[in-house]
Amino acid sequence: MERVVVVGGGVLGTMHAVAARRRGLDVVHVEREPEPRGASVRNFGLIWVSGRAPGPELSLALRARAGWEGLAADVPGLGFRAHGSLTLASSEAELQLLKEAAALPDAAVRGFELLDPAAARAVNPALRGEFAGALRCRRDAIVEPRLAQRALREHLLEGGSGYTWLPGREATEIAPHAVRDHTGAWHRGDLVVVCTGATHTGLAGPHLAGYPQPPVRRVRLQMLQTEPFDGRLTTAVADGDSLRYYPAFDLPGRHRLPPQEPAAASVRAQLLLVQRLDGSLTIGDTHSCDEPFAFDVDEDAYDHLRGRAEALLGTALPRTQRRWAGVYSQVTGTELYHRSQIAPGVILVTGPGGRGMTCAPAIAEETFA
Ligand SMILES: Cc1cc2nc3c(=O)[nH]c(=O)nc-3n(C[C@H](O)[C@H](O)[C@H](O)COP(=O)(O)OP(=O)(O)OC[C@H]3O[C@@H](n4cnc5c(N)ncnc54)[C@H](O)[C@@H]3O)c2cc1C
């Protein structure tokens, strides 16, 4: 193999370009937008190991985290920080579940440690609000989603003539070992990797319209970013609602949690909070699978998320500077992501769901392995 064509400039496409260049392959990288605008620039930048299911999912996430860390040594623009996370319990029931998680056989691999409130504040002094205890995960990390893809592309471009970035080109047709963009130009390679994210129509459409159930679905999330916060968060933070969603916490204690607060339940909210390099706070999220998705963002969800963050930080948040929604592609079956051959020499990789930013480096390595 000598030449690879990658379609899609999100984190999956970009990590495939990185993996191909690492093997000395020439890469042509096609993206329909002038700059990627998909899930990869809209996310938290959480490299999230803590919530992964034991077994293959945890293993994929750990390999990917090592991949991010390794890349960060060469690409400081990723903003990689091995800050870990604190998941905060607000009730006795949530605390019991954290205790079960801290006793898991793979707790040490995840870097889990149960902390009382004083110990949690010693780790992250910005947490001046009320909570019953915390689960620390030392393996969780942070990157800067708005900067990471561009930083990786610049790194590849610095590496010489083997990488060609073609933004503003929408791929419209597939043929064996080739893809055509909307200008009519064909791009040929020994391998074409299609990473078109949550665009489940277009090129990928015929291959994702499974019967009786398509292999992927779309999920929409609401997010916000504040103005710079007057304080430093030394970890990422999650609230107890996150225990309801992540598979690692599918333990007996989850079934003893009381019903979720209506304001959170109505939008399937969990609080995740990450401080950006400029001091601002990225806060989310909500989850909706009901299409057609709203084209506008809902303020009730933001009231809830800001209220949760203020309760845990014990202080008022800065003004909201930005609001947005993002959509990711998620497999509907038990696999960790979707990979299929859609023509000779053409493979489609999508559907990693809420673990896509975390797992992208390892997913790309698996394609070439
Ligand atoms: C709000 C939000 C928060 C999240 N938080 C996290 C997190 O903190 N940690 C985590 O691990 N995961 C997170 N995720 C999930 C993660 O962001 C996604 O799984 C991941 O970004 C998917 O990457 P992708 O490259 O497949 O898709 P995308 O980033 O959407 O990229 C697809 C690209 O393909 C391009 N494209 C589409 N069709 C064509 C075509 N025909 N021709 C050329 N280009 C095309 C698009 O323009 C786009 O740039 C989050 C997702 C969202 C939405």
Image (tube, helix red, strand yellow):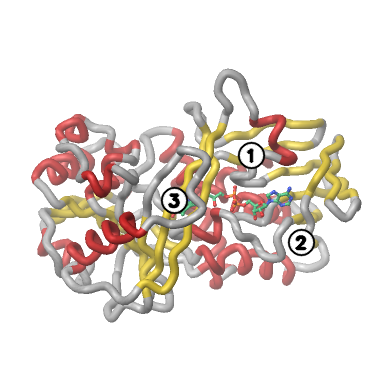
Tell me the kind of residue under disc 1.
His
The numbered mark, 1 or 2, whose residue comes first in the sequence reads 2
The residue under label 2 is 168
Q: What is the x, y in percent for residue 170?
A: 77, 53
Tell me the kind of residue under disc 3.
Leu
- Residue plotted at (42% across, 43% down): 288
The numbered mark, 3 or 1, whose residue comes first in the sequence reads 1
**Marks 1 and 2 in Cβ contact (< 8 Å):** no
Report the front residue among 59 and 304.
Answer: 304
Circle 3: element type: strand
252 left or right, relative to 20: left
- Residue plotted at (50% across, 35% down): 336
Mark 3 vs ligand 1: CB under 8 Å? yes
Question: Looking at the image, which residue sits at the far top?
Answer: 212
14 left or right, relative to 168: left
Q: What is the x, y in percent for residue 113?
A: 21, 51
Q: Quadrant of the N terminus?
A: top right
The residue under label 1 is 200
Q: Residues within 10 Å of mark 3 (few under 14, many from 20)?
A: many
Q: What is the x, y in percent for residue 337?
A: 55, 36
The residue under label 3 is 221
| Vertical side of 368 occupied by 71: above or below | below
Report the front residue among 369 and 39.
Answer: 39
Q: Could you tell me how far apart the alpha carbons at marks 3 and 1 are, in whole angstroms?
A: 17 Å
